Image (cartoon, helix red, strand yellow):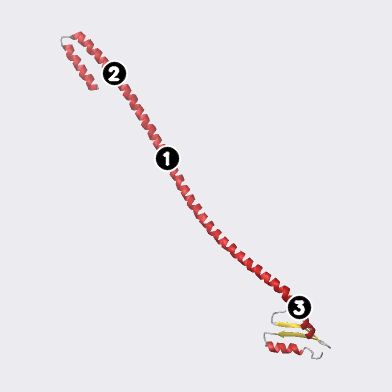
């Protein structure tokens, strides 16, 4: 552009030096003025366009920076959520394992309870059948042997009192040091053979 202006100026100088002076000079000056105004308008337009481009670039750069920041923030949040998900998954697996263990324990307790109920029923059945007959046998032994037993002794000690015709004789036998046959013989010796 500037070169065109210079060329035009040189052309004007040549025309001035030539013979058609004033008219040619006026035409050249008008052309030069028109050209110069067009040059200024073009320069203003280009300046506005360049300023607009710079502003657009600045805005685009800022948007890009903002988007990068948002992307980084989103990635951090995503990583945090992934870690939280892993922790929740691990806790869920632990809770599932605990739940399975507790369910097995509950099932075992239910089985044990069922067994206990069955045993209790058997004991109740035996009690209603055996205890009356055991009481009867104990009363019969007492009438025949006239021995009253103490029941709050150690398991291997037989303790009681034999109520004979003339006197009461205490009984204290340690069954851990004597044979069953010897204990039986001693107890039968208390029983009177006279009826």
**Residue nearest the viewer, comparing 50 with 93:** 93
**Residue at the farthest right position:** 166
Q: Distance from label 2 to label 3 (Cα)?
A: 137 Å
Does dot 1 land on a helix, a strand or a loop?
Answer: helix
Q: Earlier in the sequence, mark 3 or mark 1?
A: 1
Question: Which residue is drawn at the image coordinates 36% and 32% (left, top)?
Answer: 57
Could you say whether the residue bearing mark 2 is in a helix, strand or loop?
Answer: helix
Q: Which residue is mark 2?
A: 38
Rendered position, 83 above or below 21: below
Q: Nearer the viewer, residue 3 or 31?
A: 31
Residue at 74%, 82% in the rendered image = 159
How far apart marks 1 and 2 lie (CA) works out to 46 Å
The residue depicted at 30 percent of the width and 21 percent of the height is: 42
Position of the N terminus by quadrant: top left
Q: Earlier in the sequence, mark 2 or mark 3?
A: 2
Question: Which of the labelled discs sits on residue 135, or is there none?
Answer: 3
Residue 41 percent coordinates (x, y): 31, 19
| Res. 185 image quadrant | bottom right
| Residue 69 circle label | 1
Q: Position of residue 30 (x, y in %)?
A: 25, 12
Q: Residues within 10 Å of mark 3 (few under 14, many from 20)?
A: few
Classify residue 123 by image quadrant.
bottom right
Among the 4 quarters of the image, the one containing residue 64: top left
Note whether 104 is above or below 143 in the view shown. Answer: above
Residue 36 lies, in percent from the top left, at 27, 17
């Amino acid at each position: 552009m500037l070169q065109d202006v210079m060329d035009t100026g040189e052309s004007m100088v040549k025309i001035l030096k030539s013979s058609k002076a004033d008219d040619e000079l006026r035409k050249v000056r008008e052309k030069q003025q028109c050209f110069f105004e067009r040059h200024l308008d073009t320069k203003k337009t280009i300046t506005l366009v360049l300023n607009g481009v710079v502003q657009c670039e600045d805005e685009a750069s800022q948007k890009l920076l903002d988007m990068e920041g948002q992307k980084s923030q989103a990635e951090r949040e995503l990583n945090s959520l992934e870690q939280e998900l892993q922790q929740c998954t691990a806790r869920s697996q632990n809770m599932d394992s605990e739940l399975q263990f507790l369910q097995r324990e509950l099932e075992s307790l239910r089985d044990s309870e069922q067994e206990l109920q069955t045993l209790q029923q058997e004991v109740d059945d035996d009690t209603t059948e055996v205890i009356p007959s055991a009481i009867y046998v104990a009363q019969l032994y007492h009438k025949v042997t006239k021995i009253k037993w103490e029941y709050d002794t150690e398991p291997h000690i037989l303790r009681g009192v034999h109520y004979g015709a003339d006197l009461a004789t205490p009984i204290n036998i340690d069954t851990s040091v004597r044979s069953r046959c010897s204990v039986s013989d001693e107890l039968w010796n208390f029983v009177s053979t006279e009826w």
